[in-house]
Image (tube, rainbow, N blue to C red):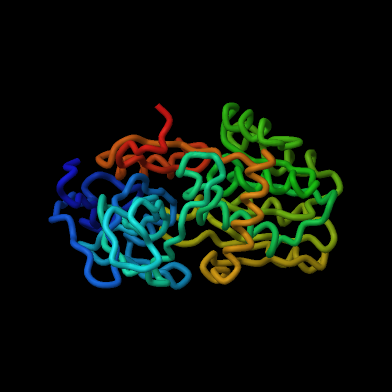
Amino acid sequence: MKEDRNCQWRVARRPRGNVVRDDFAYTEEDVPTPGSGEFLLKNYYVNLAPVMRMYMSGESVAGERALDIGDVIHGRGVAEVVESKHPDFAVGDFVHGQMGWQTYKVSAGTAQEKFRKVPDVGLRYTVALSALGMTGFSAYFGFVDCGRPKSGDVVVVSGAAGGVGTHVVQIAKAMDCRVIGIAGGPEKCALIKSLGCDATIDYKSEDLSSAIPDACPEGIDLYFDNVGGDTLSVCLENLAMHSRIVLCGSISEYMLDEPYGLKNYTRLRRTNSLMQGFFIYNHVDDFDRAEADMCRWLESGAVRPVEHVFDGFESVPDALASLYSGQNTGMALVRVRRGPHDEE
């Protein structure tokens, strides 16, 4: 990576199956210069999310624009304002928002880019991409607003060792729920146990159709779904009365030629249950509430960010590919360059 150039990753072609290096094009441009009402950002971290492959495939997801061949790939980042002609952003501010996969960006601070200043909660600035970013906010709005948890609820979280899942587990415990986490492998199950799970299920070595009813003999009050597919189907067979299912993600289906055909959704009828999806940017007017509550939990120690940091801008394509084989734990992100806020 060249410090005096704006280095970028762009869409080279539509991926088939998991993303590979040939799906990405590396380019360099001059570092842009801000005009009136704009500011220049220097990127330190970019986030990774499974949905990025869908954008690269030309799909528009929940209103987010699909990517054309040659486009800089979508991605949020943590960046420093290094030059400013904007009244609300000063040189030295650290912000998070839609940076894209590039090392510099000029912004006018538009609503579409959703740049927010990084709150100081005594943690390194990566927290703006995990607990205080769209990952943490997805956990917050999906669980709190859509799930409407009550003290004592039996909560099942799939993908519990992922970015959203690790936050949901901790928020659920902070709200006095009994939490069962589903994850793949003993190391991930040990991680979510350390975050507060009352019980764990290893989907790689256990049969979900028996493990879930064993862990939830009275049924599931709230299922937070990050994976879709068979796991969602099994949970539908084990609902308590008046239960809630929150549809956050479906990573098990992202590389299928056709979406998974859910055949037992009518199980919702017998228990008067609700199944609801959500899109994080439909909650943008409430981001301040989410940030305030998440800051409170972070400062009290009730929630701690779990981050999987890949190093180097050149590693971004391979790091994204690793998400679909479950190699990360917690929030996956790439350090573009070392900053003054990093631990040595």
Q: Give residue 271's quadrant in the image.
A: bottom right
Residue at 54% from the left image edge and 43% from the top image edge: 162
Frontmost residue, 308 versus 22: 308
Frontmost residue, 266 versus 14: 14
Is residue 256 visible in this depiction of the protein? no
Is residue 90 visible in this depiction of the protein? yes
Q: Where residue 244 sits in the image (x, y, percent)? A: 74, 61
Frontmost residue, 161 versus 194: 194
Residue at 35% from the left image edge and 47% from the top image edge: 18
Q: Where residue 224 sits in the image (x, y, percent)? A: 66, 54
| The C terminus - image quarter | top left
User: In the drawing, does residue 48 fall left or right of residue 228?
Assistant: left
Looking at the rendered structure, the number of numbered marks drawn on it comes to: 0
Residue at 22% from the left image edge and 65% from the top image edge: 34
| The N terminus - image quarter | top left
Q: Where residue 74 sits in the image (x, y, percent)? A: 34, 59
Above or below residue 92? Residue 34 is below
User: In the drawing, does residue 330 fall left or right of residue 167?
Assistant: left
Above or below residue 209? Residue 136 is below
Residue at 73% from the left image edge and 67% from the top image edge: 274
Above or below residue 315? Residue 152 is below
Q: Where residue 100 sits in the image (x, y, percent)? A: 32, 57
